[in-house]
Image: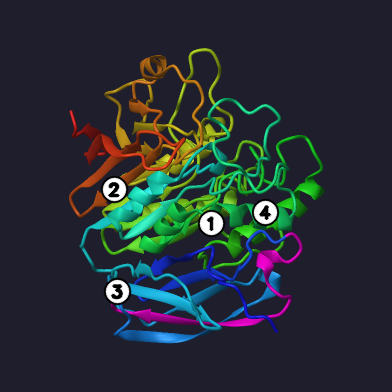
């Protein structure tokens, strides 16, 4: 039998941190884009060795073992590690047949009584063909405690016949749109071969939720968004969710066309991270579905954490436009759902969003048009990593929406620090994405005081 080529071409990752454990991830793929064999792997199970240490040199290995890599799951590996110390850094690696992966850093969540600050970043919308993931390289250098990815990890599009200037910076693996399991797997492989994305995964544990482009543009519930067959769409969604699981450090695997994305990730007494799914359960004018909405309202109402961080994909606050109605693909299209969530929201609500390819900072108010109305919380909307923003009249948006305090269309991410007193968000932007090596600038900073935004950089 021929010796396996280097199999860790897609990097390593960790995620879903708890006070006593994390998920470790890799996928065996010596030939990531092989035309007939996923990852260039044989159609048989393999056994991968993993190690977890307290130091990057692995002189203090605390746990090790083996894990299966099954062909039905594209030889992906998900190791559920438990028995670890809270609020502790660990280092991990994988090996098979003499090959050793790069080393990744992970970190466990603190214990339930901890008041230590949390440093985290959130990102979204990283369209490969639109540019280089330099922002993720800068994020990796921050070595945060946690990274939240708020959707559009991949884009399913093929290459347009006549791409706009600057919209096809890097070639995809295929000119066709992803609709099958094999195509989604290849698209993830193309993305995960990127060294900047690999660096960001190796720097810290991630907690991710999908938005629409992991499946199809503007899908909602059981509907494809293009008037096509719901049955055919659910088959496609099953393939997309399976590929998503195969390439993320998730605790839960999909069941047919369903994937449990909403979940609670506590961070001591400082923050409750509440991950909500704003795609899968939409029906009529209901954004979350009855079961998820009840879960979210109960978690908000019962949280004893200083900050209740609602992390989800789409724009939450009201956003009016000069020449068109509000977006039906955001919470503006589901105002009753938003009102019910806000009715349950206690002091310390912070909403994190992505999707719109531009950065916003918003006050969440009882009356959107009245600056003196009761402050219910704040929303930070992150910029895209690379995905091109639409054409937006920034001055008109700010004039029509007095609760929106900031808008910017540069690419980047948001870096946050939360403790028992303060919540700070700094918007980081790269100068360009059409070539590697862009410098990073902090373009705005905010603190949350009495449930309102306060600009710190002006």
In the picture of the structure, the residue carrying the numbered disc 4 is: 184
Q: Residue 297, image x and y in percent? A: 45, 51
Going from the N terminus, do you reach mark 1 or mark 2 first? Answer: 1
Q: Which residues are magenta?
A: 35-55
Residue reaching furthest front? Answer: 2
In this picture, residue 190 sits left or right of residue 233: left
Q: Residue 42, image x and y in percent? A: 71, 75
C-alpha separation, residue under disc 1 versus residue under disc 2: 25 Å
Q: Quadrant of the C terminus?
A: top left
Element under disc 2 = strand
Going from the N terminus, do you reach mark 1 or mark 3 first? Answer: 3
Nearest to viewer (mark 1 / mark 2): 1
Discs 3, 4 touching: Cβ within 8 Å: no
Q: Is residue 338 visible?
A: yes
In the picture of the structure, the residue carrying the numbered disc 3 is: 86
Quarter occupied by residue 269: bottom left
In this picture, residue 209 sits left or right of residue 374: right
**Label 1 neighbourhood size at 10 Å, few (<14), some (14-19), many (20+)?**
many
Q: Residue 160, image x and y in percent? A: 68, 32
In the picture of the structure, the residue carrying the numbered disc 2 is: 416
In the picture of the structure, the residue carrying the numbered disc 1 is: 192
Element under disc 3 = loop
Nearest to viewer (mark 1 / mark 4): 1
C-alpha separation, residue under disc 1 versus residue under disc 4: 12 Å
């Amino acid at each position: 039998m021929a010796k396996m080529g280097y199999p860790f071409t897609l990097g390593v990752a960790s995620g879903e941190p708890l006070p006593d454990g994390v998920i470790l991830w890799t996928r065996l793929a010596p030939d990531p884009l092989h035309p007939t064999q996923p990852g260039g792997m044989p159609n048989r199970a393999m056994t991968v060795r993993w190690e977890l240490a307290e130091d990057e040199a692995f002189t203090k290995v605390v746990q090790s073992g083996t894990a299966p890599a099954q062909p039905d799951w594209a030889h992906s590996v998900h190791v559920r590690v438990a028995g670890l110390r809270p609020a502790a850094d660990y280092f991990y690696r994988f090996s098979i047949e003499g090959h050793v992966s790069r080393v990744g850093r992970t970190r466990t969540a603190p214990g339930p009584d901890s008041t230590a600050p949390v440093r985290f970043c959130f990102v979204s919308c990283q369209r490969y063909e639109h540019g280089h993931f330099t922002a993720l390289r800068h994020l990796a250098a921050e070595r945060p405690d946690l990274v939240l990815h708020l959707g559009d990890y991949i884009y399913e599009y093929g290459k347009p016949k006549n791409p706009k200037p600057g919209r096809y910076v890097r070639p995809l693996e295929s000119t066709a749109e992803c609709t099958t399991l094999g195509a989604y797997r290849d698209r993830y492989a193309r993305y995960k071969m990127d060294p900047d994305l690999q660096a960001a995964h190796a720097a810290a544990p991630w907690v991710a939720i999908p938005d629409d482009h992991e499946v199809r543009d503007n899908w909602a519930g059981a509907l494809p968004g293009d008037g096509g067959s719901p049955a055919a769409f659910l088959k496609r969604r099953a393939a997309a969710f399976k590929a998503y699981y195969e390439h993320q450090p998730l605790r839960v695997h999909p069941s047919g066309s369903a994937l449990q994305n909403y979940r609670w990730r506590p961070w001591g007494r400082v923050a409750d991270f509440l991950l909500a799914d704003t795609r899968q359960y939409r029906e009529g004018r209901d954004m979350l579905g009855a079961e998820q909405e009840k879960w979210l309202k109960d978690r908000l109402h019962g949280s004893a954490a200083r900050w209740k961080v609602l992390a989800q994909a789409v724009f939450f606050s009201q956003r009016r436009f000069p020449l068109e109605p509000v977006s039906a693909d955001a919470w503006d299209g589901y105002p009753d759902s938003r009102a019910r969530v806000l009715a349950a929201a206690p002091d310390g609500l912070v909403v994190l969003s992505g999707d719109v390819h531009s950065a916003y900072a918003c006050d969440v108010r009882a009356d959107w048009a009245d600056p003196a109305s009761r402050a219910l919380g704040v929303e930070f909307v992150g910029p895209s990593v690379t995905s091109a923003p639409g054409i937006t009249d920034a001055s008109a948006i700010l004039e029509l929406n007095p609760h929106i305090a900031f808008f910017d269309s540069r690419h980047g991410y948001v870096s946050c620090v939360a403790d028992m007193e303060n919540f700070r968000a700094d918007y980081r932007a790269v100068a360009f994405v059409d070539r590697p090596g862009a410098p990073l600038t902090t373009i705005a900073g905010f603190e949350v005081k009495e449930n309102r935004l306060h600009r710190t950089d002006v």
